[in-house]
Image (spheres, grey):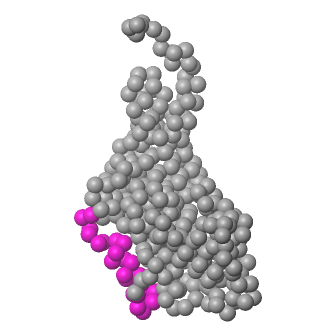
Amino acid sequence: MKPDHNEDDHFDGLSDELLSLIFSKVLDAESLCRCSAVSKRFASLIPLVDAVLLTIPPPKSKPNRGLFLNFGNSLQVTNFIAKLLQFLHQIVLPQSSVSFHSNEGSIHHFSSEVLKNFSHITSLHIQLPSHGGELGANGTGSLLKWEAEFGRELESCVVLGATYFERSNKISRIPKRQDRLHESSLATDELKLRVAWMISCLFAASARHCLLKQIIADNPMMLRSLVIEDGSKQGRLRMGEDQFKELRKCVNTRPPLERTKLPAICIKLWYVPLLELPASGCVMKGATLIVIRPLNQVMKMKSDGDLLAGAFDGEEEAEALCEAVREILKEKKPYLMEMNSF
């Protein structure tokens, strides 16, 4: 039987309100752009969608490592933080100035071109491509997760890491807390590694914040919520409505292609050499929790408990990560550090 080309289009029977509701559930920006090419009616409704997921395709050339993390389990760094910072600047920033500008520029260009098709976005989720090799990915057994909040500049960053993270119900016997307190001091090399984790997470977060400023400069949006994360879900940058109001005050022209400068920071670092997570059935070795805040805002911001209460919500291993945060906080008082702006 030949198809009846005069047959009614069932979409014509749907109201604009119902079609708009359907499109709002799609989220994926690429799929929505394709739908807009179906008909003039679709093309008039899709720009009104208020929530969009933008997935950035992998770049053809090597990605800007400022947006991602790729650190092994040890770093041969001397003179502690001074040379560590110099080392990280060399590998994260101008490894190749051409590569840095071309790759971050291409991500910015792609994002701006897609988002200009939407005029009413209030909730935006950007997923950057995963280039592989991230700590904690590809079955390496290690773990590194971070979550940062920005307004005009950094407001907070939480880092959770472990040199080994076993997802298993077969938990080996772990010494009681009082029997292992003498082991819970950080050796110099272990502290260097954790400072490297912290700085690399901050670099990645500040690079994503700069990318966001470039996008907003080209596409004025009345955003109320934002998440920028990588495909491996190692780290994510979050912003809310009040933070966007603060950011818009300083985004008048296109920012340069570089990361956002970080203010002087106050750091709290908790370390547990061996941590049992009975509720989730996991074990962490070298478990580390780091809370980072701007030094001049410490007294004005919410408490550590309030900040950590929402950290890592929505993660694939959220139950284990949240349990790890609770258990680490029970162990001991944190190491306290300060770091100048960089």
Instruction: Indicate whether 176 appears above or below 53.
Output: below
Judged from this view, the residue extending furthest toward the left is 98
> The C terminus lies in which quarter of the figure?
bottom left
Magenta segment main secondary structure:
helix
The reply to whether residue 242 is in sight is no
Residue at (64% x, 88% y) in the render: 184
Q: Nearer the viewer, residue 20 or 188?
A: 188
**Residue range highlighted in magenta:** 77-99
Q: Nearer the viewer, residue 287 or 207?
A: 287
Instruction: Indicate whether 31 appears above or below 39.
Output: below
Q: Position of residue 172 (x, y in %)?
A: 66, 77
How many numbered badges does the structure rendering display? 0
The reply to whether residue 171 is in sight is yes
Please say whether residue 95 is one of the residues in the magenta stretch. Answer: yes
Residue at (55% x, 83% y) in the render: 338
Image quadrant assignment for residue 92 = bottom left
Q: Position of residue 129 (x, y in %)?
A: 40, 55
Residue at (35% x, 48% y) in the render: 110
Q: Nearer the viewer, residue 218 or 88?
A: 88
Q: Position of residue 220 (x, y in %)?
A: 45, 46
Instruction: Indicate whether 21 appears above or below 107.
Output: above
Instruction: Indicate whether 76 appears above or below 291.
Output: below
Q: Position of residue 186 (x, y in %)?
A: 58, 89
Residue at (40% x, 24% y) in the render: 38
Image quadrant assignment for residue 87 = bottom left
